[in-house]
Amino acid sequence: MDNSFWIRSDRFHLKDKTKYIIDAWLKIDQMISIKLDDQLLDYSIEESDEIQDDTIGRFVKIIVFLPDALESYQSLKVFSSGKEEEVLFEAKVLALLKKKQPIQTCYDKIDVDFAAKTCKVEGWAVSSEPVEINLLDDKNNPVHYEIQRVKRRDVQALYPEYDLDQEIGFIVTFYYGNSKKGTLSIRTSSFVINKELHLSRAYYRRERLQALLKKARVVIKTEGFGNFIRAVFRKLKGKVAPTRALPVSYQEWIKHHLPDEQELKRQRGYTFENRPLISIVIPLYKTPEHYLTQLIDSVKAQSYGNWELCLSDGSGEHSPIKSMLEQFETEDERIKVVHNEKQLHISENTNEAIKIASGDYIAFADHDDLLTPNALFENILLINKHPDAEVIYSDEDKVDEEGQYVQPHFKSDFNIDMLCSVNYICHFTVVKRSIIDQVGMLRSEYDGAQDHDFILRCVEATSHIYHIPEILYHWRISEDSTSENPESKRYAIDAGKKAVKAHYDRIGIAATVEDGEYFGLYRTRLQRKSDPLVSIIIPNKDHIDDLKLCIDSIEEKSTYKNLEYIIIENNSTEDATFDYYDQLKATNPRVKIVTYEGNFNYSAINNHGASFASGDYYLFMNNDVEIINPETIEELLNYAMREDVGVVGSRLYYPDGTIQHAGVVVGLGGVAAHSFANHVPGDTGYFHRIIVTQDCSAVTAACMMVNRTVFEAVQGFSETLAVAFNDIDFCLKVRALGKLIVYNPYAELYHYESKSRGIEDTPEKIQRFQNEIAVFQSRWSDILEQGDPYYNVNLSLDTQDFSLKSV
């Protein structure tokens, strides 16, 4: 999905049905073309009257001019114009024809007074012809009613072609007596729309119960079981919870997490069994004196004292900081300086500092940044706990011109696919000297991204990589720094792409590396050597409209063709379902229909389907998804074919473009939940994590690819988990094999959110759900207690947006 274009609404012009109106957000420089099948259509664009920031994009009305015989076409598509056409939006003609009806209606409220046996209906109806409203009882007899006509300026804003003086709103009130149902009929001379009105108390009790259960299910799925239980208790206590907690102030948070003098005193007196020398290497280049002073003061303030500071001045023969550095050398024997006679670029300047370093570990910092006073202590603490540590990194924030700490980056534990998407490790990095001796120092051909190239070479040489989830480094914001303005160093972005590509070359993975959506982000396109058979495994019970949309989207859009479909029939009851199966088998030789006759058990159904699959790779897919990116299956397969990868998941959207799935965090909401659920189109998430390829603990099986041998190694899905958490459990079993779970945001689909299964609406189903939570918590107690390694412990488990945990 291209975030340069998304739609708020679409409709036909009331008076001219050849005009199709799309209310959309358009990037400021975005050019589009519109086609009906292969026919290029004319269109015009009207700017919106609403106030908006148009520096990036704006809301517009796109008026598309359609032919009269719309029925003879298949689909309408909006494309981006450029070197390569990309589908931004697609509408099936059958769906458009439904919107073309001559009356548009909305029912805002239906109130039934059971004591007085009266009903009040509020709504509006618009048409190019006069509209008549009638009311019928459950035997189709006319019913006396009172009607109040009202003007609706809000509706006029939607339909500006309608006469504002028309009273298009209505309030209908009537006595229904003993009737259980009624019909509100809205008609013109050529068209009629009927609205069924339910008038029994039992109906509304069922409706309310189902609405509450549905809401509970959504809360559990997107926010986790823990949040659901807390919400229930708040309701029972008569408290109304806010829709969203107030965000935690980072300035307040950091005050409580930086060590105070008492803690620093304790650290200075701490006795370590192993007290290695740490050499802090820093390249200098005409560093402003006050920044350099603050940096050196932050090193001198370290609570761990066995360090040396190795500075290389690459400012050249007439260095403005030479005398200042000589004074620092004189004052503290732990400070060592290389005075270079010529100006040096960043890599060779850093290497000069490394050459004079004698420490067992080398720590890297920039010339105008700051260390927290416990930075070295925390690293030595980890080295004593994990003597095998060879690469260590920590969390960081930024410090602005006023000295305020802002923009904290609470990082994932080691995440190779994220590292190939962005240099998330950055500061503060400590590397064992033996690793540097093995991989070499910094390389000048990668200047601008020399640290990214260096860290990639280091992690290739060792698996002993540790992350300290604490803020140990303050990265200074200045006008021309990449921290504030990455575009100021375009050459650094190009060097980063080159560094990531070199990494793939060294480890034998064929790939190309492109610019990501933002500066500093990279997109990898893995290249495969073969096109293995992919078995798409889809459980289904009725809902053939969903299934047809799913399969049609693959057949019509997918660029990958070596496929077979395993459709698992599970207790369908509608004749139309089996007619569609017969049609599929007759027209598509790649379709197999297999039958599972037991009660609904997602795990057992998919295991049963997999037993009929012939492919080397299984793509588990819900019947209510629709692919967006034509390369979705290729994106999944290219990663699934990597030896170190076990499962690959996709980015899923709700129909309105908000995020449904961008990976799973174990522990979120008490058990597990989707990251960034309900984030709006264009939102890239915490440090762009919605839009970058990365490793995570789990992904949803609504669209998930796995190697056949991996599936068999973990014996498929656990059938003790019939409905909930079976996909999370499956991913964790795969991770236990030492395989990675990859979230690939370029595999994009709409997910129409479990339309095909009923809600947890019986005591038996609710009890089963609770039992499955207990099974999951028992089986995976370690990760629930210790925390998801791809989710920082400083982040909240109560929200999906990577908010800061309360102080």
Image (spheres, rainbow, N blue to C red):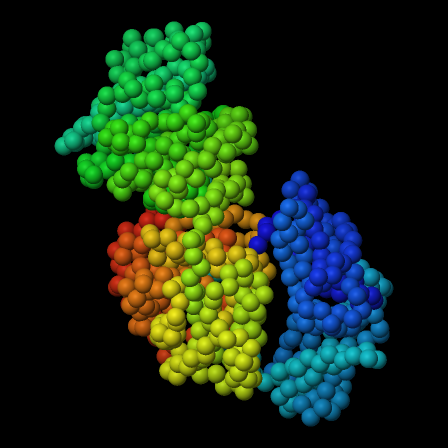
Query: Residue at 39% across / 21% down in the picture?
Result: 348
Point out the image quarter for the N terminus. bottom right
Give percent across and percent down for residue 632.
51, 58
Query: Residue at 23% across / 24% down in the picture?
Result: 359
Image position of 618 (left or right of 201): left
Q: Could you say which is closer to the camera, residue 35 or residue 394?
A: 35
Query: Residue at 37% across / 22% down in the picture?
Result: 350
Q: Is residue 155 visible?
A: no
Image position of 614 (left or right of 690): left
Q: Is residue 312 visible?
A: yes
Q: Could you say which is closer to the camera, residue 798 or residue 42?
A: 42
Q: Is residue 91 above or below residue 283?
A: below
Give percent across and percent down for residue 627.
54, 62
Residue 9, located in which quarter of the rendered image? bottom right
Q: Is residue 283 above or below residue 192?
A: above
Q: Is residue 377 above or below residue 155?
A: above
Give percent across and percent down for residue 700.
42, 62
Query: Residue at 28% across / 51% down in the picture?
Result: 786
Give percent across and percent down for residue 78.
68, 57
Q: Residue furthest front?
A: 530
Q: Is residue 365 above or below residue 775?
A: above
Instruction: Count numbered badges in the picture.
Output: 0
Q: Could you say which is closer to the camera, residue 787 or residue 207?
A: 787
Point out the image quarter for the C terminus. top left
